[in-house]
Image: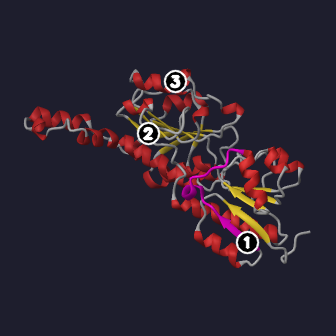
Protein backbone atom coordinates (compact mmCIF):
# COMPACT_ATOMS: atom_id res chain seq x y z
CA UNK A 1 0.00 0.00 0.00
CA UNK A 2 1.34 3.42 -1.00
CA UNK A 3 1.24 6.06 1.75
CA UNK A 4 1.80 9.80 1.86
CA UNK A 5 5.24 9.25 3.28
CA UNK A 6 6.33 7.40 0.14
CA UNK A 7 8.32 9.83 -2.02
CA UNK A 8 7.76 9.10 -5.70
CA UNK A 9 9.73 10.24 -8.72
CA UNK A 10 7.76 11.46 -11.69
CA UNK A 11 8.95 12.14 -15.23
CA UNK A 12 6.78 14.46 -17.31
CA UNK A 13 7.60 14.74 -21.02
CA UNK A 14 4.23 16.21 -21.97
CA UNK A 15 3.59 19.97 -22.07
CA UNK A 16 2.50 20.96 -18.57
CA UNK A 17 1.27 24.18 -17.01
CA UNK A 18 3.55 25.71 -14.38
CA UNK A 19 0.73 25.78 -11.83
CA UNK A 20 0.45 21.99 -12.03
CA UNK A 21 4.18 21.48 -11.65
CA UNK A 22 4.08 23.73 -8.60
CA UNK A 23 1.22 21.75 -7.04
CA UNK A 24 3.09 18.50 -7.46
CA UNK A 25 6.34 19.86 -6.06
CA UNK A 26 4.57 21.52 -3.15
CA UNK A 27 2.79 18.28 -2.22
CA UNK A 28 5.98 17.00 -0.65
CA UNK A 29 5.35 13.51 -1.99
CA UNK A 30 6.71 13.81 -5.52
CA UNK A 31 10.08 14.59 -7.01
CA UNK A 32 9.41 16.02 -10.47
CA UNK A 33 11.56 15.78 -13.58
CA UNK A 34 10.02 18.00 -16.26
CA UNK A 35 11.34 17.50 -19.79
CA UNK A 36 8.67 18.91 -22.10
CA UNK A 37 9.18 17.45 -25.59
CA UNK A 38 8.31 20.81 -27.13
CA UNK A 39 11.37 22.24 -25.42
CA UNK A 40 13.74 19.26 -25.63
CA UNK A 41 12.67 18.10 -29.10
CA UNK A 42 12.80 14.51 -27.82
CA UNK A 43 10.03 11.96 -28.24
CA UNK A 44 10.95 8.43 -27.16
CA UNK A 45 10.07 6.00 -29.93
CA UNK A 46 13.06 3.74 -29.18
CA UNK A 47 12.11 1.42 -26.30
CA UNK A 48 15.71 0.95 -25.14
CA UNK A 49 16.22 4.69 -24.78
CA UNK A 50 12.99 5.07 -22.84
CA UNK A 51 13.77 2.10 -20.58
CA UNK A 52 17.17 3.59 -19.80
CA UNK A 53 15.64 6.98 -19.07
CA UNK A 54 13.03 5.58 -16.71
CA UNK A 55 15.22 3.01 -14.99
CA UNK A 56 18.35 5.11 -14.46
CA UNK A 57 16.27 7.84 -12.83
CA UNK A 58 14.14 5.49 -10.73
CA UNK A 59 10.89 6.82 -12.21
CA UNK A 60 7.68 5.67 -10.53
CA UNK A 61 5.18 7.79 -12.47
CA UNK A 62 5.51 8.64 -16.17
CA UNK A 63 3.35 11.30 -17.84
CA UNK A 64 3.65 11.36 -21.62
CA UNK A 65 1.98 12.71 -24.73
CA UNK A 66 3.79 11.07 -27.64
CA UNK A 67 6.35 8.61 -26.26
CA UNK A 68 5.73 4.95 -27.13
CA UNK A 69 5.18 3.03 -23.89
CA UNK A 70 5.07 -0.50 -25.25
CA UNK A 71 4.95 -3.84 -23.45
CA UNK A 72 8.74 -4.10 -23.21
CA UNK A 73 8.98 -0.69 -21.55
CA UNK A 74 6.29 -1.68 -19.08
CA UNK A 75 7.88 -5.05 -18.31
CA UNK A 76 11.40 -3.73 -17.85
CA UNK A 77 10.66 -0.71 -15.66
CA UNK A 78 9.20 -0.22 -12.21
CA UNK A 79 6.41 2.17 -13.13
CA UNK A 80 3.52 2.39 -10.70
CA UNK A 81 1.35 4.84 -12.65
CA UNK A 82 1.29 5.93 -16.31
CA UNK A 83 -0.44 9.03 -17.59
CA UNK A 84 -1.24 10.04 -21.17
CA UNK A 85 -2.24 13.62 -21.94
CA UNK A 86 -4.41 12.50 -24.82
CA UNK A 87 -8.09 11.89 -25.35
CA UNK A 88 -7.31 8.18 -25.69
CA UNK A 89 -4.04 6.67 -24.39
CA UNK A 90 -3.15 5.13 -27.76
CA UNK A 91 0.60 5.49 -27.12
CA UNK A 92 0.47 3.07 -24.18
CA UNK A 93 0.21 -0.73 -24.32
CA UNK A 94 -2.91 -0.97 -22.19
CA UNK A 95 -2.99 -4.77 -22.05
CA UNK A 96 0.56 -4.88 -20.71
CA UNK A 97 -0.21 -2.19 -18.14
CA UNK A 98 -3.33 -4.06 -17.03
CA UNK A 99 -1.41 -7.34 -16.75
CA UNK A 100 1.12 -5.66 -14.47
CA UNK A 101 -1.66 -3.89 -12.51
CA UNK A 102 -0.39 -0.43 -13.44
CA UNK A 103 -3.20 2.15 -13.60
CA UNK A 104 -3.30 4.33 -16.71
CA UNK A 105 -4.77 7.81 -16.44
CA UNK A 106 -5.63 10.04 -19.39
CA UNK A 107 -7.28 13.33 -20.30
CA UNK A 108 -10.62 12.80 -22.06
CA UNK A 109 -12.01 15.83 -23.92
CA UNK A 110 -9.22 18.12 -22.78
CA UNK A 111 -9.25 19.62 -26.28
CA UNK A 112 -13.00 19.51 -26.96
CA UNK A 113 -13.53 23.27 -26.68
CA UNK A 114 -10.41 24.01 -28.74
CA UNK A 115 -11.54 21.74 -31.58
CA UNK A 116 -15.08 23.15 -31.46
CA UNK A 117 -13.70 26.69 -31.66
CA UNK A 118 -11.54 25.85 -34.67
CA UNK A 119 -14.44 24.11 -36.39
CA UNK A 120 -16.57 27.24 -36.19
CA UNK A 121 -13.58 29.36 -37.25
CA UNK A 122 -13.17 27.22 -40.36
CA UNK A 123 -16.87 27.54 -41.11
CA UNK A 124 -16.63 31.33 -40.89
CA UNK A 125 -13.50 31.26 -43.04
CA UNK A 126 -15.37 29.47 -45.81
CA UNK A 127 -18.60 31.40 -45.37
CA UNK A 128 -16.79 34.72 -45.88
CA UNK A 129 -14.19 33.42 -48.38
CA UNK A 130 -11.39 34.60 -46.11
CA UNK A 131 -8.68 32.25 -47.42
CA UNK A 132 -9.47 33.02 -51.04
CA UNK A 133 -9.49 36.78 -50.47
CA UNK A 134 -6.32 36.68 -48.40
CA UNK A 135 -4.52 34.72 -51.12
CA UNK A 136 -5.76 37.12 -53.79
CA UNK A 137 -4.34 40.12 -51.97
CA UNK A 138 -1.07 38.41 -50.98
CA UNK A 139 -0.09 36.81 -54.27
CA UNK A 140 0.43 40.13 -56.07
CA UNK A 141 -2.09 39.44 -58.84
CA UNK A 142 -4.74 41.83 -57.58
CA UNK A 143 -4.69 45.36 -58.94
CA UNK A 144 -7.17 47.91 -57.66
CA UNK A 145 -7.27 49.39 -61.16
CA UNK A 146 -9.24 46.31 -62.16
CA UNK A 147 -12.13 47.82 -60.23
CA UNK A 148 -12.09 51.18 -61.99
CA UNK A 149 -15.06 50.45 -64.23
CA UNK A 150 -18.49 49.56 -62.92
CA UNK A 151 -18.41 46.02 -64.31
CA UNK A 152 -15.10 45.21 -62.63
CA UNK A 153 -16.30 46.52 -59.27
CA UNK A 154 -19.57 44.58 -59.52
CA UNK A 155 -17.86 41.38 -60.61
CA UNK A 156 -15.45 41.58 -57.67
CA UNK A 157 -18.22 42.02 -55.12
CA UNK A 158 -20.40 39.35 -56.68
CA UNK A 159 -17.60 36.79 -56.78
CA UNK A 160 -16.70 37.18 -53.12
CA UNK A 161 -20.15 37.61 -51.60
CA UNK A 162 -20.37 35.61 -48.40
CA UNK A 163 -23.09 33.85 -46.44
CA UNK A 164 -24.19 34.02 -42.80
CA UNK A 165 -24.09 30.96 -40.56
CA UNK A 166 -27.44 31.85 -39.03
CA UNK A 167 -29.20 31.16 -42.30
CA UNK A 168 -27.68 27.72 -42.81
CA UNK A 169 -28.60 24.14 -42.04
CA UNK A 170 -25.51 22.54 -40.54
CA UNK A 171 -25.10 18.79 -40.28
CA UNK A 172 -22.93 17.32 -37.52
CA UNK A 173 -21.77 13.72 -37.87
CA UNK A 174 -21.00 12.44 -34.38
CA UNK A 175 -22.87 14.37 -31.70
CA UNK A 176 -20.61 13.51 -28.79
CA UNK A 177 -18.57 15.85 -26.61
CA UNK A 178 -17.04 17.84 -29.49
CA UNK A 179 -20.05 17.66 -31.80
CA UNK A 180 -22.32 18.96 -29.05
CA UNK A 181 -19.96 21.86 -28.35
CA UNK A 182 -19.98 22.76 -32.04
CA UNK A 183 -23.76 22.57 -32.01
CA UNK A 184 -24.07 24.85 -28.99
CA UNK A 185 -21.78 27.47 -30.55
CA UNK A 186 -23.74 27.44 -33.80
CA UNK A 187 -27.20 27.38 -32.25
CA UNK A 188 -26.69 29.93 -29.48
CA UNK A 189 -24.15 32.09 -31.28
CA UNK A 190 -25.58 32.20 -34.79
CA UNK A 191 -29.05 30.65 -34.73
CA UNK A 192 -28.12 27.91 -37.21
CA UNK A 193 -30.47 25.01 -37.84
CA UNK A 194 -28.83 21.74 -36.79
CA UNK A 195 -29.10 18.20 -38.10
CA UNK A 196 -27.09 15.40 -36.52
CA UNK A 197 -26.26 11.77 -37.17
CA UNK A 198 -25.18 9.66 -34.21
CA UNK A 199 -26.67 6.24 -33.45
CA UNK A 200 -25.56 6.53 -29.81
CA UNK A 201 -27.11 9.91 -28.96
CA UNK A 202 -30.93 9.80 -28.57
CA UNK A 203 -33.10 12.66 -29.72
CA UNK A 204 -34.13 13.38 -26.12
CA UNK A 205 -30.53 13.90 -24.93
CA UNK A 206 -30.35 17.20 -22.98
CA UNK A 207 -27.80 18.75 -25.36
CA UNK A 208 -29.88 17.73 -28.37
CA UNK A 209 -32.95 19.36 -26.85
CA UNK A 210 -30.94 22.46 -25.89
CA UNK A 211 -29.69 22.98 -29.45
CA UNK A 212 -32.99 22.00 -31.08
CA UNK A 213 -31.02 19.55 -33.24
CA UNK A 214 -32.87 17.07 -35.44
CA UNK A 215 -31.68 13.46 -35.61
CA UNK A 216 -31.54 12.16 -39.19
CA UNK A 217 -29.97 9.32 -41.12
CA UNK A 218 -26.61 9.90 -42.77
CA UNK A 219 -27.87 10.23 -46.33
CA UNK A 220 -30.46 12.81 -45.32
CA UNK A 221 -27.81 14.82 -43.49
CA UNK A 222 -25.51 14.80 -46.52
CA UNK A 223 -28.30 15.87 -48.86
CA UNK A 224 -29.87 18.63 -46.78
CA UNK A 225 -26.94 20.33 -45.03
CA UNK A 226 -25.28 23.54 -46.19
CA UNK A 227 -22.24 22.73 -44.06
CA UNK A 228 -21.21 19.33 -42.75
CA UNK A 229 -18.75 18.68 -39.91
CA UNK A 230 -17.57 15.25 -38.79
CA UNK A 231 -16.58 14.53 -35.19
CA UNK A 232 -16.49 10.73 -34.94
CA UNK A 233 -13.84 8.59 -33.20
CA UNK A 234 -11.49 6.42 -35.29
CA UNK A 235 -13.10 3.04 -34.65
CA UNK A 236 -13.94 0.14 -36.95
CA UNK A 237 -17.46 1.29 -37.75
CA UNK A 238 -16.32 4.80 -38.75
CA UNK A 239 -13.54 3.79 -41.15
CA UNK A 240 -14.15 5.75 -44.40
CA UNK A 241 -17.78 6.15 -43.37
CA UNK A 242 -18.04 9.20 -45.63
CA UNK A 243 -17.32 7.72 -49.04
CA UNK A 244 -17.69 8.71 -52.68
CA UNK A 245 -21.42 7.97 -52.69
CA UNK A 246 -22.10 10.22 -49.69
CA UNK A 247 -19.87 13.06 -50.90
CA UNK A 248 -21.79 13.06 -54.17
CA UNK A 249 -25.06 13.53 -52.30
CA UNK A 250 -23.93 16.96 -51.06
CA UNK A 251 -25.34 20.16 -52.48
CA UNK A 252 -23.01 21.93 -54.93
CA UNK A 253 -23.21 24.92 -52.57
CA UNK A 254 -22.27 22.88 -49.47
CA UNK A 255 -19.01 22.75 -47.48
CA UNK A 256 -17.37 19.82 -45.68
CA UNK A 257 -15.22 20.04 -42.53
CA UNK A 258 -13.05 17.36 -40.95
CA UNK A 259 -11.36 17.97 -37.60
CA UNK A 260 -11.72 14.36 -36.44
CA UNK A 261 -9.52 11.88 -38.33
CA UNK A 262 -8.88 11.29 -42.04
CA UNK A 263 -9.55 7.63 -41.13
CA UNK A 264 -13.25 8.49 -41.04
CA UNK A 265 -13.51 9.67 -44.66
CA UNK A 266 -12.41 8.62 -48.12
CA UNK A 267 -9.90 11.42 -48.63
CA UNK A 268 -9.49 10.66 -52.35
CA UNK A 269 -13.24 10.98 -52.83
CA UNK A 270 -13.24 14.35 -51.07
CA UNK A 271 -10.35 15.51 -53.24
CA UNK A 272 -12.25 14.50 -56.36
CA UNK A 273 -15.46 16.35 -55.49
CA UNK A 274 -13.41 19.48 -54.76
CA UNK A 275 -11.36 19.14 -57.94
CA UNK A 276 -14.51 18.68 -60.01
CA UNK A 277 -16.23 21.58 -58.19
CA UNK A 278 -19.03 19.33 -57.00
CA UNK A 279 -19.08 21.09 -53.62
CA UNK A 280 -18.35 24.66 -52.60
CA UNK A 281 -15.34 24.10 -50.34
CA UNK A 282 -13.89 22.47 -47.25
CA UNK A 283 -11.99 22.97 -44.02
CA UNK A 284 -9.48 20.27 -43.05
CA UNK A 285 -7.23 19.75 -40.04
CA UNK A 286 -6.48 16.03 -40.52
CA UNK A 287 -5.04 14.09 -43.45
CA UNK A 288 -3.96 10.65 -44.59
CA UNK A 289 -0.35 11.84 -44.71
CA UNK A 290 0.87 13.75 -41.67
CA UNK A 291 2.66 15.86 -40.64
CA UNK A 292 1.32 18.30 -43.21
CA UNK A 293 3.70 20.37 -45.30
CA UNK A 294 3.43 22.81 -48.19
CA UNK A 295 3.07 19.95 -50.69
CA UNK A 296 -0.34 18.98 -49.31
CA UNK A 297 -2.58 18.46 -52.31
CA UNK A 298 -5.54 20.35 -50.85
CA UNK A 299 -3.54 23.59 -50.80
CA UNK A 300 -4.09 23.93 -54.54
CA UNK A 301 -7.72 24.83 -53.84
CA UNK A 302 -8.46 28.42 -52.83
CA UNK A 303 -11.76 27.27 -51.37
CA UNK A 304 -10.16 24.91 -48.82
CA UNK A 305 -8.85 25.97 -45.41
CA UNK A 306 -5.91 23.71 -44.50
CA UNK A 307 -4.54 23.36 -40.96
CA UNK A 308 -1.65 21.08 -39.82
CA UNK A 309 -3.60 19.04 -37.22
CA UNK A 310 -3.71 21.96 -34.80
CA UNK A 311 -7.24 21.54 -33.49
CA UNK A 312 -6.08 21.00 -29.91
CA UNK A 313 -3.03 23.25 -30.02
CA UNK A 314 -3.95 25.94 -27.50
CA UNK A 315 -2.48 27.14 -24.22
CA UNK A 316 -5.80 26.29 -22.60
CA UNK A 317 -5.58 22.63 -23.62
CA UNK A 318 -2.24 22.40 -21.81
CA UNK A 319 -3.88 23.90 -18.73
CA UNK A 320 -6.86 21.50 -18.98
CA UNK A 321 -4.70 18.38 -19.31
CA UNK A 322 -2.42 19.52 -16.51
CA UNK A 323 -5.32 19.95 -14.09
CA UNK A 324 -6.70 16.51 -14.92
CA UNK A 325 -3.39 14.71 -14.60
CA UNK A 326 -2.30 16.50 -11.41
CA UNK A 327 -5.62 15.72 -9.74
CA UNK A 328 -5.24 12.02 -10.43
CA UNK A 329 -1.53 11.86 -9.55
CA UNK A 330 -2.35 13.35 -6.14
CA UNK A 331 -5.31 10.98 -5.84
CA UNK A 332 -3.01 8.05 -6.54
CA UNK A 333 -0.40 9.12 -4.01
CA UNK A 334 -3.04 9.65 -1.35
CA UNK A 335 -4.89 6.39 -2.01
CA UNK A 336 -7.99 8.10 -3.39
CA UNK A 337 -10.04 6.85 -6.36
CA UNK A 338 -8.76 7.90 -9.78
CA UNK A 339 -11.14 10.10 -11.77
CA UNK A 340 -9.81 9.50 -15.27
CA UNK A 341 -8.53 5.95 -15.07
CA UNK A 342 -8.64 4.10 -18.37
CA UNK A 343 -10.75 0.97 -18.46
CA UNK A 344 -11.43 -1.03 -21.60
Rounded to the nearest angstrom, the CA distance separating label 2 from label 1 is 42 Å
Q: Which dot, 2 or 1, sits closer to the camera?
A: 1
Residue drawn 70% across the image and 31% down it: 237
Does the magenta segment cover residue 295? no
Horizontal side of residue 332 vs 244, given as left or right: right
Horizontal side of residue 112 vs 108, given as left or right: left
Residue drawn 36% across the image and 45% down it: 164
| Whether residue 188 can be seen here | yes
Disc nearer the start of the sequence (2/1): 1
Disc nearer the start of the sequence (3/1): 1
Residue position marked by numbered label 2 in the rendering: 306
Horizontal side of residue 330 vs 22, given as left or right: right
Residue drawn 20% across the image and 35% down it: 141
Where's residue 341, x and y in %? 78, 57
Q: Nearer the viewer, residue 289 or 235?
A: 289
Residue position marked by numbered label 3 in the rendering: 268
Which residue range is magenta in the image? 30-46
Residue position marked by numbered label 1 in the rendering: 31
Horizontal side of residue 234 vs 330, given as left or right: left
Rounded to the nearest angstrom, the CA distance separating label 3 from label 1 is 50 Å
| Whether residue 82 can be seen here | no
Where's residue 76, x and y in %? 84, 51
Query: Pointer 2 and pointer 1: residues touching (CB < 8 Å)?
Result: no
Dot 1 crowding, Cα within 10 Å, few <14, some 14–19, many 20+:
some
Which element type, helix, strand or loop, lies under badge 1?
strand
Does the magenta segment cover residue 37? yes
Rounded to the nearest angstrom, the CA distance separating label 2 from label 3 is 16 Å
Q: Quadrant of residue 82?
A: bottom right
Amino acid sequence: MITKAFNMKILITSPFHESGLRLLRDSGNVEVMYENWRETGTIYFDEDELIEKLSSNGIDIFITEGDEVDSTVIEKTQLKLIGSTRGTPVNIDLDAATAKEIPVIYTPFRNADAVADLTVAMMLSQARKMVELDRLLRNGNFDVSDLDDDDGFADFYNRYTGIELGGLTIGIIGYGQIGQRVGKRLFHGFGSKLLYYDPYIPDDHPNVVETNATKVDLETLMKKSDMISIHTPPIEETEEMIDEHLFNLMKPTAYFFNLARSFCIDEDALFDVLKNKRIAGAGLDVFDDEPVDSDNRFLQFDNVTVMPHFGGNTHDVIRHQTEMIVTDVLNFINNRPLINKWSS
